[in-house]
Image (tube, rainbow, N blue to C red):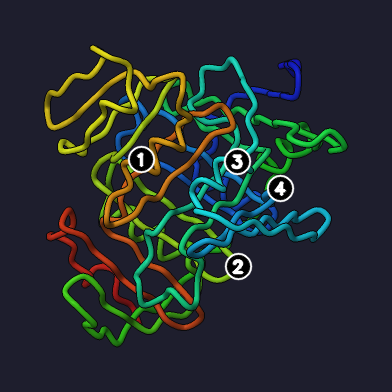
Amino acid sequence: MALKQKFRTSMKKVNGDLLTPISIFLRLQGQRKFLLESSAKYEGNGRYSFIGANPRKTYSGNDTHLQDLSHLSNKHYHYEGEIISLLKQVMPRVTSDTEYPLTGGGIGYIHALPPVLHEAVPALQFHVYDTLIIFDHLTDEIAVFHTNIEAEQVEPNIDQLIDELFAVSNLDDTNYALHSLQQESQQLTTAQFSGDAFALYRNLRVQEAAPYMYYMEFDECTVVGTSPKSFLQIRDGALSTTNEDANLDTLCQKDSIEKRNARQTGLLSPAFHAIDAVKQLMPQDGLIGYIGFNGQVDFTTPAKTLTIIGDKAYIQTTNDASDFTLNALMKG
């Protein structure tokens, strides 16, 4: 299929019925890789899986300090202020008319990792990906989408990237060890870890399949987990949250707010950006998900999450994960 190009964006679709999100991830070359997928593959937002590597930049911060690291130039930029407000200021914004909810943007978390890790990992961290692989579970199509977020940027060779995904290769079946559990608190358990974090994720996605499943590689840690429901979504200005107690009066347009089936919805006021809603509705457990260049957001809470740092795994659960059993994940 011919390459489609619009201002600042390029996309190509191919038939992907011989591949899966897992095989795409394993064949994709690069660093700081991620995978977002869902057990509800044919329902709503679960229709698409998103895979990426080699982010253009990383935003990270604690308290009132945000760092902007460009991976191309290795330059660091520093900003002072409230970190979510700073994130709103620096996150690139590119309007794109597309069928996909995410075509590029920030993948990461906000206040979602165990507090005991405050000194080891940032409180907020997002990798910014300008090139995404999108797997459509309904049509078995693969779309490779690139967004040029900097004027001097050289666009990647999308055809070459697609060729890599279909190249004949022997994918090694890696393994991991997880053992020596220690209960630290009601919601935190630690364990000894070794081996491949993605092998752990592959087991987790089978044992604890859920509408939200995520694997994210950061320099300080790797975050893997599943969660049963969305906390906050914004699509084309339509806001939806499972926080029934949230006050949407200031965020949403008058007379647009509705409550039903343990969910609140409304039309985001033109005066606000999606990140304003993220800041105002931030839950105590934090958020994991994405902020798209196009202003779309989708976040869940870290119901069942493992943060791996070196030879140690920090296993956290929230009130939504009372049925989380670790026996099926233990090895070694």
State yes or no: discs 4 and 2 in contact (Cβ < 8 Å).
no
Three-letter code, disc 3: Gln
Identify whether 36 is placed above or below 286.
Answer: above
Judging by the rendered image, the residue that carries numbered circle 2 is 219
Real-space Cα distance between discs 2 and 3? 23 Å
The Cα atoms of the two marked residues, 4 and 1, are separated by 25 Å
- Tag 4 and tag 1, C-beta contact below 8 Å: no
Disc 3 to disc 1: CB gap under 8 Å: no
Marks 2 and 1 sit apart, C-alpha to C-alpha, by 25 Å
Image location (x, y in percent) of residue 112: 37, 59
Q: What residue is drawn where x is 51% and y is 23%?
A: 100
Count neighbours of disc 2 (C-alpha within 10 A) and say few if under 14, some if 14 to 19, many if 20 or more.
Answer: few
* Chain-order first, disc 2 or disc 3: 3
Q: Mark 1 sits on what residue?
A: 38
The residue labelled by disc 4 is: 56
Q: Earlier in the sequence, mark 4 or mark 1?
A: 1
